[in-house]
Amino acid sequence: MAKKPEKKEYKEHPSTPQRITDTLRENYMPYAMSVIVSRAIPEIDGFKPSHRKLLYTMYKKGLLNGNRTKSANIVGETMKLNPHGDGAIYETMVRLTRGNEALLNPFVDSKGNFGKVYSRDMAYAAPRYTEAKLDAFCAELFRDIDCDAVDFVDNYDGTMKEPSLLPTTFPNILASANTGIAVGMASNFCGFNLAEVCRTAIACIKDPAHDLLSTLPAPDFSTGGELIYDENEMRAIYESGRGSFKVRAKWEYQKKENIIEVTEIPYTTTIEAIIDKVAELAKAGKLREIADIRDETDLSGLKLAIDLKRGTDPDKLMAKLMKMTPLMDSFSCNFNVLIGGLPRVLGVRQVLDEWTAWRTECVRRRVYFDLNKKKDKLHLLHGLAKILLDIDKAIRIIRETAEEAEVIPNLMIGFGIDQIQAEYIADIRLRNINKEYILKRTQETEALEKEIKKLEEIVGSKAKIRNIIVAELEQVIKKYPSERRTKLVTAEAVPVFDETEHIEDYPVLLFLTREGYFKKITPQSFRMGSEHKLKDGDEIVWQAETTNKAEIIFLTNMQQAYKARLYDFDDCKASALGDYLASKLGMDEGETPVFAFQPGDYKGIMAVVFQNGKAARFSIDSFETKTNRRRLTGAYSGKSPAVQFFFPVDETTEITMFSTANRALTFRAGMLDIKASRSTQGVQAMVLRGKHTVTRAVRMEDAALTDNGRYRCRSIPSIGALLTDEDLPDKQLTL
């Protein structure tokens, strides 16, 4: 019998194709989980790992009560816990400093240039030039760190221990603003006022049904500003952990200098972003009221100066700037926090409940740690009390013991004590072996027993632990008073910017060319020079007279409609080419405008004549949209090329069509039913035979026919009438 060949184990070559699902599971998923759990999402103590490692390193260096040290020293030490480059660690530290002003309650007391959260270009100095230490406020982070309140874990190489969480005595997760982008999810916590957070936590502990808005009305930001307050909106954010609200800048008008001074801006923007946007709008001609804008920020704080032109209303201008620039910005909340290693989006009440449960366990572990310490001490004192009965016997046992190793066993036998007690007694100095010393020590026994009994009651009572948490929160409020920086204003008190109020209205003449150039010319300018400048072969195909505030809609060869306001176009002269609409309106490649009309109040009726002899009539209200959309698809049917558009038309409007068969047909628009859809193919108006098509269509009065009655039909479809010699195109040209 032939021997069955051994099955060779197949080893995958690096170049061998691998299933995408295996690649995701083996390579991408561990990376994604690492970013979510160990980098980007904060935990219930309010810190990401990078923050926690940095602050703990500073604590171990004695920087809570000591003097400041060079930031470079701190960064170097932190690298023992945080396996990242010095740049990333220092950047983390910068955000936590008092100088950067990113936090309402900074954790690092800094000296030197640490930049500003409200400035994009104000770079922080290198770590060799700056100094730092822990702020006194950090005592609330590390009070219980050495009392077994939290777990300690190995660092990345197993050479050190670091805390898994910091036992904060207040809900830092809400008090400190925090943002992070993980893989497939993100987190964005706004800051809240410290005193308000603590009062709310106390109220929720005492009454689970407490109304949060009564003690925690809204977020608070280190950059101040004014929060546009909407109670329903805020309740929704508090309940779901998601939502957004608006914050606007705080400003004052200096009448004497005719200057607006902005002293507080939204947390989500920077001075440079505001200046850039204002400059962009001014360049586009949309901010003619501003003469200059300057950044006058100095050691006294943020200041943005806006010089106004004479006659400018500062209130109306600021309402305009709030609408068009980041002087008013939105903050999007996403309260995503790690609970037990799992990311969860929680509402404010849920966050406080989770923090309270976690803090309860921290306090219980701390009390249990103190309890064991006192029990150990009491155990030693009980052994010392037995020696008090016969000090001479203890001395005799030690003196008569031949070997040092036998001292402890002999004391244990002689007094009936255990090894720990015997070790303690044997280590007492000779000068302390007197009744006075031993009596003083043993008198502590009664007090210790009372303290132990009290601690045991606390460990076994959830209510007493909650009372301790409440007392600590009250101490935080008392020790670190914090005034609200972001003021609250109701939506009703905020002036609404109406763009049309700030735009001058005046008569204008409109011209559209075949090549897609558009001109808006004032009558005065047109009277001074009415000769149009056009590209070779181009011609005016549409013109109208209206006002600067009117709306206009352009229809293109790709059956799309583009809506615009005339004030978005600059006034020009007839001697200029005008605006190229394809670029101005962002049209698709190869798309050109073929018709324009003014919708007015969207009450009119439009008619379209197609090359295949069909015609359609539909209401203009189908172009009206509730949202401010600029582009609409399906503006008209694309089954056959459009020959001409007519607007407005009514029941009596007469349209004349011409075909390649030298025929003409005049019909009333009322013969066409009004359709609900813009993309209707219409009905057959002119009967075409063979390969004949409609060449053009005009209003009857523009057809220049000698006998209009000859071509008028009573019903459609109709083949029309042959053009007479007088009405043939070549004859028309000779007229």
Image: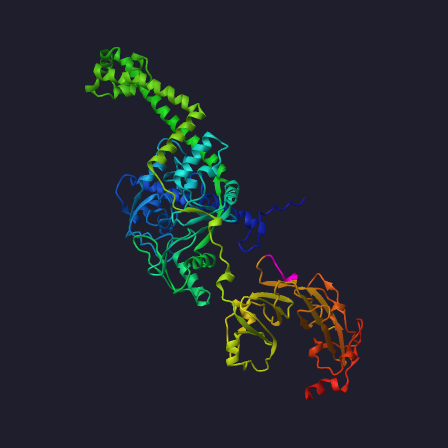
Quadrant (top left/top right/bottom left/bottom right) for the C terminus: bottom right
Scheme by which the image is coloured: rainbow
**Residue 248 x, y percent position in the rendering:** 43, 52
Whether residue 164 is visible, yes or no, is no
Q: Is residue 429 above or below residue 581?
A: above
Indicate the quadrant where residue 119 lies: bottom left
Indicate the quadrant where residue 55 lies: top left
Left or right of 466 on screen, residue 389: left
Residues shaded magenta: 621-626
Q: Is residue 242 above or below residue 638?
A: above
Left or right of 555 on screen, residue 210: left
Q: Nearer the viewer, residue 672 or 367?
A: 672
Quadrant (top left/top right/bottom left/bottom right) for the N terminus: top right
Whether residue 16 is visible, yes or no, is yes
Indicate the quadrant where residue 165 lies: top left
**Residue 28 x, y percent position in the rendering:** 52, 49
Left or right of 250 on screen, residue 558: right
Left or right of 633 on screen, residue 394: left
Total labels drawn? 0
**Residue 616 x, y percent position in the rendering:** 72, 67
> Which residue lies most toward the left here?
431
**Residue 293 x, y percent position in the rendering:** 37, 62
The stretch drawn in magenta includes residue 497: no
Q: Nearer the viewer, residue 689 or 423?
A: 689
Residue in view at x 38 percent, y 51 percent = 88
